[in-house]
Image: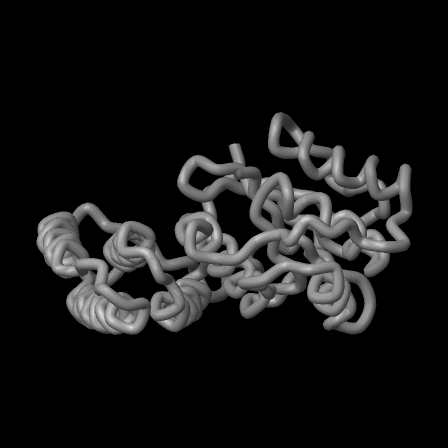
Amino acid sequence: MEPSVEQSLSPEQHEAFFQELIGKMPMVHHADKLEELALLGLSMTLRREASKDLREELARQIKAIIAKVEPGHTPEETAAAMATAAKDCILVLRVAKEQRKPRPPGNAPHPHHAAHHPHHAAHPPKDAEMSNAKVVKIVVGVVVLLLAAGGLAWWSGKETPNSDGSETTKFVEQIIQATQGEPPATHMFGGTLKVTSMGGVPVVIAEKVPPRICAASGMKLVKKGLLSVNGVTPTRVSSAIITELCNKDDGDATIMWAPK
């Protein structure tokens, strides 16, 4: 069974995740989605059983903050109420971070663990793996889309030009099928294909996707689920935006997709 995103992030990635998460919270425009996002951040910050009481108390505070949000008579009033709620929820998460229990002795990975296993096969080169920063940005982006999709503008209905027909269709099918069972280790273009889970939702990560296929398939995938390209989850989606993201980094692209 694939580890969950929460379990697979290192302490450094958790810290980066926290910073990315609180940076995204003011962008959420629906109270229920803000509550879900804040509670997710809380559960990831206070994961240990020893923090259960504090986690439950702070969860009550978050719910109380959200309960005070009332739709204003104007968009400006509603936006102001949401901004205040987001600020207060972020303060609660900072309290959680400051008061969380330290890692129990002996649970931390040994800094020289790899040196004790010289017979293990060498890991792939670092350039074949996503950097911590990219992993965190992709994860946060998909989390925000999963929780806040109701407040974001989605696919405008235009098909992307110059799609690669059968190749694109087959690649999209491969991505979708990967969420339904054991995926192959690589996708049809040779890059790594893996599936993890986030709150019970399967999330597919495809690396080294040719930019032209990324652009064409991205427009199809975004109609069927939630998409992040090269670590960026756009709040508005169009052919031009997807194409730009697919070509943002030198070389091939990384796609992360979760079904709706």
209 sits left or right of 238 in the view: right
Colouring chosen for the image of the structure: one colour
Please name the residue shown 64% across and 55% down the image: 118
Please name the residue shown 83% across and 35% down the image: 170
8 sits left or right of 169 in the view: left
- Between residues 76 and 128, which one lies in front from this camera angle? 76
* Residue 222 spot, x, y in % from top left: 64, 48
- Between residues 192 and 25, which one lies in front from this camera angle? 25
Q: Residue furthest top?
A: 181
* Residue 75 spot, x, y in % from top left: 32, 68
Please name the residue shown 61% across and 27% down the image: 180
260 sits left or right of 85 in the view: right
| The quarter of the displayed image where residue 241 is located | bottom right
- Between residues 242 and 50, which one lies in front from this camera angle? 242
* Residue 134 spot, x, y in % from top left: 59, 66
Q: Residue furthest front?
A: 73
* Residue 112 spot, x, y in % from top left: 50, 64
- Between residues 10 and 159, which one lies in front from this camera angle? 159
Please name the residue shown 43% across and 69% down the image: 20
Q: Is residue 238 visible?
A: yes
Q: Is residue 128 visible?
A: no
Q: Is residue 116 above or below residue 181?
A: below
| The quarter of the displayed image where residue 128 is located | bottom right
